[in-house]
Amino acid sequence: MHSFESLGLRHDGHTLWVLDQTQLPDTEIWLDGSEPEAMIALIRRLAVRGAPLIGVAAAASLATFAHRGASAAEYAAACAALRAARPTAVNLMWAMDRMMGAADPVAEAQAIFEEDVRLCEGMAQHGAALIQDGEGILTHCNTGGLATAGIGTALGVIRRAHEQGKRIHVYADETRPLLQGGRLTAWELRKLGIPSTLITDSMAALLLRDGKVQRVLVGSDRVAANGDFANKVGTYGVAVQAKHHGVPFHPVAPFSTVDLACPTGAAIPIELRDPAEVRGYGRWRWAPEDMPTWNPSFDVTPADLVTSLVLDRGVFSAEALRAGVLAQVCGS
Ligand code: MRU
């Protein structure tokens, strides 16, 4: 097999390694995800996460499995099991559909990896053009190199604007309950040297009111045909706040996140996770052990709160989304 490497995933030609994102920012541990069963467990516990990366990692695991001699029946069963590992991010289903139809799984996984890198470049190019010198930018969850094979979706756009010399300041929501913003986005922003400040999710409205934010950029796990989109829970609240304060709000996604089979956001399946994630984190528990919780991992933002959607294929306004542009630019 060929070797490849991104911030959170690497193949050394024999073994597929994933950076355990649950251990960041303090510890960098690489785990073997070559076997689909191991990869499913890694995806379920968010050791590997982020919509595009889940698809790329699952494809790479399947290719390694095939390369090691899996039978056609074993391959198909592993593909179906990987497909079901997480329900909301459609990039996983997109990648598994491609792997099921592939004549050469190793070449296909390599192509999926390389394509994701290019898609990130496309989003960065189109999205960075929106950003003006001096802007404060609010983002949510983690959408960077850890969430993709390339430079990221929303964070890739931010990174490109910074590289272009625009003096931006990023405000990163910590992103309850699993703190992908506080642990992962903050880690990436520090590595990249981008001026930034970490806030708790509940501080975003105040920041918007005080005029510190001129633009909101977020990722997406699934975009419906009408432009409604699912992203990490809390995104919908940020979109409502941005609308109230007249601040432009942009989801950023590759075409592989667009699901034309979902006519509206109401058809997007939302992952419900372990109630314990709301009661505590790691060794820490702050709520009574038997306290009932509700833990949807994603929410759906309606397209009418979107200023424009940044895709690898261009920037599409709310009007264009309403007119059905996604069927034209993402249909086969
Ligand atoms: O549960 P996660 O950490 O996989 O959720 C990830 C997100 O919601 C990201 O914002 C998303 O995948 C956006 S695009 C990289």
Image (cartoon, rainbow, N blue to C red):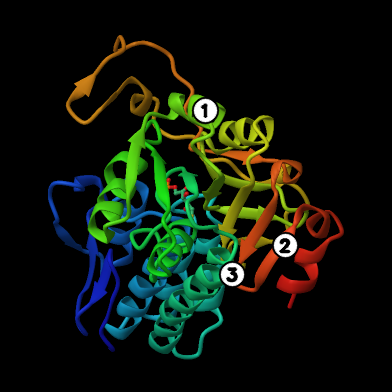
Q: Amino acid at mark 2?
A: Phe
Give the number of the mark in front: 2 or 1.
1
Of residue 301 and residue 244, the one placed in the foreground of this image is 244
Query: Residue 151: which quarter of the image?
Result: bottom left
For the residues labelled 2 and 1, the Cα–Cα distance comes to 28 Å
Q: What is the crowding at mark 1: few (fewer than 14 residues within 10 Å), some, or many (at least 20)? A: few
Would the CB of label 1 be found within 8 Å of ligand 1?
no
Q: Which residue is mark 3?
A: 126
Of label 3 and label 2, which has the lower sequence position? 3
In the rendered structure, are the residues bearing label 2 and label 1 in contact, judged by CB atoms less than 8 Å apart?
A: no
The residue that disc 1 covers is 210
In-front residue for pair 51/205: 205
Q: Is residue 32 left or right of residue 131?
A: left
Q: Decide if ligand 1 comes within 8 Å of the CB at mark 2.
A: no
Of callouts 2 and 1, the N-terminal one: 1
Q: Which residue is mark 2?
A: 316
The residue under the point 41% across, 56% down is: 167
